Amino acid sequence: MGWLTSCDDEAIACGGNLAIIGNELLQFADALPLGDGRFRLSGLVRGLAGTEATNHAEGEAFVLAQPNTLRTVRLPAWSAGREAAVRARLPNGEEALASTIVRDVPAAPLRATRIEVGGEQVVGARVPGIPSPTGGSTVDLEAREAIQSLLGALRRHGLIES
């Protein structure tokens, strides 16, 4: 590990002393050297970017990140509640596990505006209700029953309003 330095509030506001310890993203203002490559960090800004501020174990991974080097990785909807490993390539070319995260389940259900199968839209937004057949000069009971069944199925699946 390199040498850690302290920084002022302006540097913190610009992303200075950004670090990952275990699964937590944080910043520190002061780094007091204790010897043997150890430091006491203070002036902490903890739990950044929604990470959880927890107690850390001795020997837990510590990564000092440079401003503008972290990237957001959009995970697919199906990954909600599943673990994802974040790996880093070290200067010597080795790959190391930097962190393991669990993608939160979204607070609100995902809402689609359309569903396509093979590039063809099969379900779109709900359309206004369709009135059941009534009146007319010719009454075809079989046709009316078939139409009622179709409309009932569309209403039950929420594809048309009731």
Image (tube, helix red, strand yellow):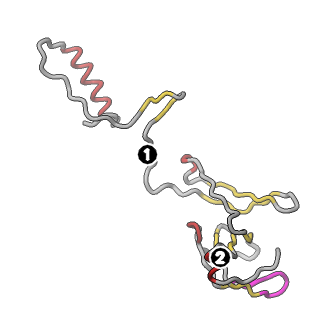
Q: Counting residues from the N terminus, which is met first, the one under dot 2 or under dot 1?
A: 2
**Which quarter of the image is occupied by the C terminus?**
top left
> How packed is label 1: few (under 14 Cα within 10 Å), some, or many (20 or more)?
few
Taking the spot 60% from the left edge, 58% from the top edge, the residue there is 102
**Residue 58 placement (x, y as % from top left):** 74, 77
Residue 152 as seen in the image, left or right of residue 97: left
Taking the spot 29% from the left edge, 33% from the top edge, the residue there is 155
Residue on which disc 1 sits: 111
**Residue 68 placement (x, y as % from top left):** 68, 65
Task: Please tell me in which quadrant of the rendered image residue 65 appears.
Answer: bottom right
Residue 35 within the magenta-colored segment of the rendering? yes
Residue 156 visible? The answer is no
SS of the residue under disc 1: loop
**Residue 122 placement (x, y as % from top left):** 44, 29
Decide: is 77 above or below 154: below
Task: Please tell me in which quadrant of the rendered image residue 92 appears.
Answer: bottom right
Decide: is 45 above or below 101: below
Q: Amino acid at mark 2?
A: Gln
Taking the spot 79% from the left edge, 88% from the top edge, the residue there is 34
SS of the residue under disc 2: strand
Marks 2,1: beta carbons within 8 A? no
**Residue 32 placement (x, y as % from top left):** 75, 87
**Which quarter of the image is occupied by the N terminus?**
bottom right
Magenta stretch mostly in which secondary structure? strand
Decide: is 65 above or below 38: above
Residue on which disc 2 sits: 27
**Highlighted magenta segment, given as a residue range:** 33-41
Residue 155 visible? The answer is yes
- Label drawn at residue 56: none
Residue 54 within the magenta-colored segment of the rendering? no
Instruction: Give the CA separation, mark 2 to mark 1.
Output: 36 Å
